Amino acid sequence: MKVDKWETPAAFFPWGHVQRYIDQIDAQVYSVAMDFAQEQFGEQAKSCPTCDTAAKKLVWFSVSSPESDWDTGTGKVGFLTLCEKCKLQVDFLIDDELTEMQDQQWRDIRALS
């Protein structure tokens, strides 16, 4: 998936930032991780506001805020959902536990997972 060429407004993260996370997807663990994410966050995930594609049918993947957000103490880790049909960032579901772990790692060694 090549979202860095999408021209729709980016609701949560710049498209280039999103593309970097898509490019880093590990195919061996992706489906298991996204099944877990959908199990944990599926009830609160939104459907596409344009075409009404159900949240479960959207593309899900893990993403972390840019480094500048971690520098200011506002970084978040969670699951971004995309509608390929409408080329939209639909929802960003924050994982508080992963955010806390990443925040600690950023403060300790200034590295993102």
Image (cartoon, helix red, strand yellow):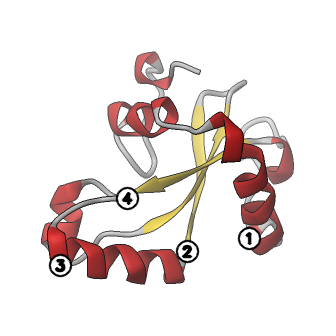
The numbered dot on residue 107 is 3
93 vs 57, left or right, is left
Circle 1 sits on which residue?
41
Relative image position of residue 36 (x, y in whole percent): 77, 64
Picture coordinates of residue 49, whole percent (x, y): 71, 46
| Quadrant housing the C terminus | bottom left
Q: Amino acid at mark 2?
A: Asp
Q: Residue furthest front?
A: 28
Marks 1/2: CA–CA distance? 9 Å
Q: Residue at x 83, y 43 (%)?
A: 52
What residue is disc 4 on?
A: 113
Q: Nearer the viewer, residue 34 or 4?
A: 34
* Residue type beneath disc 3: Arg
Q: Are marks 1 and 2 in contact (CB under 8 Å)?
A: yes
Residue situated in front as seen by the camera: 14 or 73: 73
Task: Judge left or right: residue 15 versus residue 94.
Answer: left
